[in-house]
Amino acid sequence: MADVAKAGHSLLARRMPGSQQSGLREFLSFRLGADVYAVELARIREIVSSPPVTEVPRSPSDIVGICSVRGLLVTVVDLRQRLGLLVSPPTKLSRILLANTDSGEVVGLLVDEVRHVVRLASTEIEVTGSVLGADLSDHVLGVGRPEGDFVVLLDLASMVET
Amino acid sequence: MAEGVDKAREEFFSEAQELVESLSRNLLALDAAVRAKTEDPGLVNEAFRAVHTLKGLAGLFGAKRVGTLSHRLEDVLDSLRLGRLPLTESVLDLLFRAVELYGDALSVERARSDDPLPAIDALIDEFAHLGSEGPSGTSPLAKFELDQAMLAVLTEYEEHRLKTCVQQGLLLYRVRVDFALATIDRALEDIKARAKTHGEVITYLPTGASTGIDTIELDLLLASASSLAELEASLASNGAIIEPIRLRRVEATSARSAPSLGPSAPPTPSPPAPLPAHSLSERAPDAVEPNAAAHRAIAQTVRVDIRKLDALMNVVGELAIVKNALARMSERIRAEGGRQLGSELHSIQRSFERRLGEMQNGILEVRMVPLGQVFDRLARVVRQIGREMGKDIRLVITGAETEIDKLIVEELSDPLMHVVRNAIDHGIEVAEERLRVGKPLAGTIALNAFQKGNHVVIEVEDDGHGIDETALVDRAVVLGMVDPEEVAQLARSEIFNLVFLPGLSTKKEASDYSGRGVGMDVVKTNISKLGGVIDLHSEAEIGTKLTITLPVTLAIVSALLVRIVGRVFAMPLTSVAEAITLDEKQVRMLDGREVMTLRGVTLPICRLGRIFGLAPLPGVVPPKRQYVVVATLGSRRLGFAVDDLQGQQDIVIKPLGKSLSGVRGFSGATELGDQRVALVLDPAALIEEMLRGSETARERRLGYG
Amino acid sequence: MRAFVRSALESGSDLGEVDVVEASGGFDALRLLPRGPYDLVITDINMPDINGLELIQFIRTNEHHRSTPILLISTQSSERDRKRALSLGADGYVAKPFTPEDLRSRVKAQLEKGRTSARGNG
């Protein structure tokens, strides 16, 4: 597995050749609070740490603000808030995942810590329904258990469409 | 790579869009020609080629619906150009519908939907019902002594054109010119342009005569009503030798006499003897046929992805930061004693600044497109609505070459279409009414555009019956938007501005806007999102005029940086009238709003820190003295209270993403350097918000709403 | 269309190395002809100004190029125009739709047939 979360600078996730063909889906896992979540790797274009974020007055509360990545204006969303989880102040491990949305916008997802790439066959993804609670289930694709971890797979598209 | 395919797809849509637009312009010109009872076969041919190209593209990209539509349209256009189908208003109607359908088909393709478009099948059915005429009986060409050899190399289309010209009573001429291969393009354009003013060039035939290694001799077959003398006078400078093609003498029977090509040369199948070579004048004629020039212009343009321009702008932005760093460095050097070195660096930095400014302007210019793009689309809408409502509309367009940022143009077509629709529907009276009041039968809609300083002004004027001010005010009172006691004090401009309040339409019957009714308030919102303003003026029985003022470009502006509760914001200088210090003792309450008096005039004050809900930053001391930045927009003024002024700067405004589309008061954000981002205030939206807010407060006080 | 023809000719291995010269229309072709000799001319019929028929006739009556094989790719033209092209001296035409392989094999066949004898009336 490729370890993508090197501290400090932006990296593009590397994909292992051949995994797409064998019907495995790739996700990037990260920590929000005490739990592990993941989103489709293909959507993540870059990971940045601690750029200066400017608050936007009167914006929805789960939007942290905007930041600039080499000239590209990115709206930063606090994933913990968007999912209705407890929010803690950012730490040195916090990162912003830059994701491509269907509308062409690049959105930044603020997470507590980035972990690693997780590969799951479609058969290994459990579609859970309402197990995880009302707020969450709209955005959940399913749950995976790679090597004993419990990872909630999130649907990026539904999370960032307003 | 998925990326490559997506790019190709995008290019397909962009190219297809352009082709449809060019087809639309073509059809408009054809429409004008049909109405003026003139003919321009070139237009039908161009339309045919555009549709043919579209068909090919659609096939390549598997865009089935676009392909099917193009296929049928191509057949119709082919029939038209070969004279098998007459060009009538009803045929044109179908063609215009096809253009609209292209738009639908392309969006459906774009959305990757598989939904069939029944409208296309319906249109195709109607095409099938258009009759096609067979060619007429004996050839009209028989009346001229035309060389068989020349006729043999005419294509079917060219032959059709020749017949048509002869049937119209035109004479035929052979114009022989010697061209130097090196300059043939220009020389050709030149003689083409001149020849076209006399009639139609059917074809160009290389004579094959060897007049030299680097020259070539061509015969132009020209159909014209001009006399030989006129033609000789006009084309002599091109070195042309002109021979009229003689009418066949009635006595001549089956045996053909001397061929009419060439001056009394014996009949010979081989090319005529070479004529003396003339060098062609290189001077371009004063009146170049517009079509030729237009074709030139199109070939010299490049399609650019606007994202590439944005990327370039980014680089310019970064360079601006470098420039500022250089400036600071040179100051430091001078301060630390290196006078000589510092001066030199300073002058280098100045010239860098100049070049950077040039580059910036250059890129901005590339983003600019002429408003004619939008106006063309409007012309189609005008024609369509006019026919729908049975009103004859004359559209006058001036200033189509006025340029504005491409992004603004994209957003303009909807509001403008709306305004025009309104004018035709509610403004222009029905025919009987117009006659009754002595107006010409055809209603006039005038679109005008011009640049005024940093702004572009677009005017839409109609000669309809104007706006009934009394009815407007009454309705506003009924809806609770105006206090009845204040009616008498409303200035005319304020009355007209009522039109832009939601829900206000004085049309007695239900308007044809279905659903929630798209009104002028939406138009106004759209315009202000672009950083512009819209004003209305009307005179009863005479007409109504809407004036839209827009910034020339959203991309880069001079801005005033201000600090509000510790955060930096940018305000575009175009809206800033002045900045003064705030004397709290001068501030008083009026009608629930904070105001102060500035040179005798009341100025409402807005405390942005409060409006934005900005919490004080830890460690930041509130200022002892505040400032007021007076922003104006049209006749409205508002003073924004800020903590500090941080100077002027040229900034590149970048739009906020979709996720932030609900946030009011900002026209975007800009990067200040060191990756720091500042929000750019939208004074128009803020003024709007403040004034509306105060109205609501007043209404509540008075018991309305 | 020109781009398609060019790429068809330049790809695949059956033709070997080809040097493709593109002309934007009848006039351009006239201008480029002196740079010959050419092994083959491929042309359409409906072109603005100088049309394909006129070009074919010109080539067939020009002493330097009269034996150059000419292939017609007709896109929007009629049966009557195609017949004329052949009677004026075109060696053949490639009907649409055609694949790159089709085009290459026609071109190869024509090249192998070699120089044609001057035909058609001047």
Image: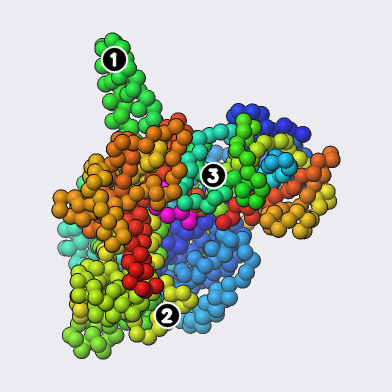
Instruction: Mark 1 vs mark 3: tell me if same chain.
Output: no
Query: Mark 3: few, some, or many residues within 10 Å (few <14, many ≥20)?
Result: many
Q: Which mark is residue A64?
A: 3
Residue A101 lies in the magenta-colored region: no
| Chain to which mark 1 belongs | B
Instruction: Tell me how far mark 1 sits from mark 3, CA to CA.
Output: 41 Å
Query: In the picture shown, does residue C45 fall above or below B644?
Result: below
Per the rendered image, the range of residues in magenta is B661-670
Pinpoint residue B58: horizontal percent, then vertical percent: 56, 60
**Discs 1, 3 touching: Cβ within 8 Å:** no
Identify residue type, mark 3: Val
* Residue identified by numbered label 2: B512
Nearest the eye: C1 or C40 = C1
Identify residue type, mark 2: Asp
Identify residue type, mark 1: Ala
Instruction: Mark 2 vs mark 1: tell me if same chain.
Output: yes
Instruction: Tell me how far mark 3 sits from mark 2, CA to CA.
Output: 43 Å
| Chain to which mark 2 belongs | B
Quadrant housing the C terminus of chain A: bottom right
Q: Which mark is residue B335?
A: 1
Query: In the picture shown, does residue B361 fall above or below B127?
Result: above
Is residue A106 visible from the viewing direction of this image? no
Would you identify the image quadrant in which residue A109 lies? top right
- In this figure, what is the number of numbered marks? 3
**Pair 2/1: label in front:** 1
Whichever of labels 2 and 1 marks the residue nearer the N terminus, that label is 1
**Discs 2, 1 touching: Cβ within 8 Å:** no
Quadrant housing the N terminus of chain A: top right
